[in-house]
Image (tube, rainbow, N blue to C red):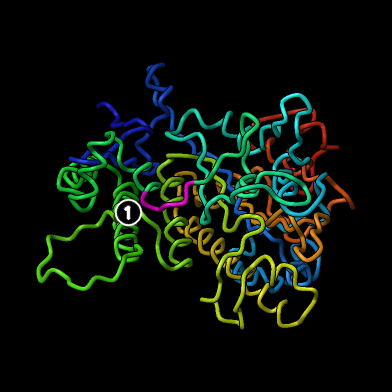
Amino acid sequence: MKTFRISRRALLRGMAAALPLPLLEVMTPVSAFAQGVTPKAGAPIRYLYFYQGNGFYPKAWNPEGNGKEFILPETLASFEPVKDKLTIIRNLETIAFGPHIGKCSALLTGHQAERDSKTGKFTNPKTVDQVIADKIGNDTLYPSISAGIESPGLGYCSGINMPMSMGSSISWRNNAPIQPELKPRNLFDMLFSRGGAEAKERAAWQGSILDKVVLQEASALQKRASSADKQKVAEYLDSVRTVERRMQSSVLTTKRAWTPPTRPGELVAPPPGVPADRSEHCKQMMDLLALALWTDSTRVATFMFTNELSEGDFRFLGSGITSSFHDTYSHHGNNPEKVACYKAINKFHAEQVAYFASKLDSIKEDDGRTLLDNSAVFFGGALKDGNGHVNVDLPVALIGSAGGKFKPAGHIKAPDHTNVANLHLTALGWYGIELPDFNGFSTGKIKEIA
């Protein structure tokens, strides 16, 4: 009797979309089919970096205690459900000058982007996420995904004469920052509408991508699947449906003088645009990134909650916030009222990452670990404190264990003035990339997580 196997690239195909599947027990690596063998597929290791511009309030970031015996700091209080999978790494810094923009460009390289004296263009080495994507991205639909919330800034940053757009991405390739995808609908189409422009158009107006054909294919698959796979497929389809509904109900719309008295059947795919509510925008993007990892559509992603110099509106948080993020609150001058608002914005973004981490931790994979266990999820920024443009003792939190490549270490301290390139050199080893150094700025690996 032949063992039932399917490719890890298998899709559920419908009238207007093709759904990637989550990793299942019956899946075999694509390369195995060419070799005529059917080894069990191991869960891949993912890499993500969530970024907040304008820095953090240091006293609310720094934990008390060392190692596993530490107290979560105020900013990271929402990480309590995943505290045993958390590593906070101290004393890292970059070689970067001036205010915000240059320091943003240095976070994933170790040194800020520089202007070429001959061409006048800024150059920057390939960032660590892109080095990892080159190694592990060929087996996925997208080698990496860059996403965010805010549009790139226009013009140049005074004082350093760098393009504002360089403060809207931490991911660099071919000497240019990779600008993030901002719209949930566009990211949704990237993941689920595989049939070109015509298919996307049909998907936009025919409602849910979980059409009758997709559900029939899913049903046929489940008849031949193990009980564990049946549950995984059911949970996955339910998650896709939940994301669709959230997107449908939250898109920014203009108030109309007249509303049609009748409506067509339930239309789930949202029109272009972004949610009116920033919190909902974050949640939708988190949910979509989780689906992208779950279905192995990508294994590498970066996400920008705010750009550097962001003047984002966070009045919805309350806490006395009445003005813009950068000018008023990141440059708080140690004014207690401004510090309280600054911390509230920091905590909001930490809560989004905690939500994402908990979501990954709820997804079981075939090796007994969760998707979070099989990931390295970073959170932080290029400034420790926006008030003085401080890029010493950077805020770096890491959740997960990269598939068991290291053990979460709680609160650890690298030697003073350790370049963040040491962290990147360490992370590369988790993905089987062994280099003598990273961009010439590293001095060795961080032993606690090597």
Label 1 sits on a secondary structure element that is helix
Mark 1 — residue?
Answer: 240
For this view, does 142 lie left or right of residue 51? left
Residue at position x 69%, y 71% from top?
329
Which stretch appears magenta? 181-185
Residue 422 covered by magenta stretch:
no
Out of 412 and 134, give the one closest to the viewer.
Answer: 134
Instruction: Give residue 34's position: percent from left, percent from top.
Output: 39, 17
Question: Count of labels shown?
Answer: 1
Out of 377 and 131, give the one closest to the viewer.
Answer: 131
For this view, does 238 lie left or right of residue 37? left
Instruction: Give residue 35's position: percent from left, percent from top.
Output: 41, 16
Q: Residue 88 appears in which quarter of the rendering?
A: bottom right
Residue that lies at the very extreme toward the left in this rendered image: 262
Main secondary structure type of the part rendered in magenta: loop
Residue at position x 72%, y 30% from top?
120
Residue at position x 70%, y 34% from top?
122
Residue at position x 54%, y 43% from top?
179
Out of 284 and 332, give the one closest to the viewer.
Answer: 332
Instruction: Give residue 425's position: percent from left, percent from top.
Output: 74, 37
Instruction: Give residue 263's position: percent from left, percent from top.
Output: 12, 65
Residue that lies at the very extreme toward the top in this rendered image: 35
Above or below, 431 against 420 in this view is above
Q: Residue 271 appears in which quarter of the rendering?
A: bottom left
Out of 99 and 54, give the one closest to the viewer.
Answer: 99
Q: Quadrant of the N terminus?
A: top left
> Callout 1, which amino acid?
Val
Above or below, 132 against 251 in this view is above
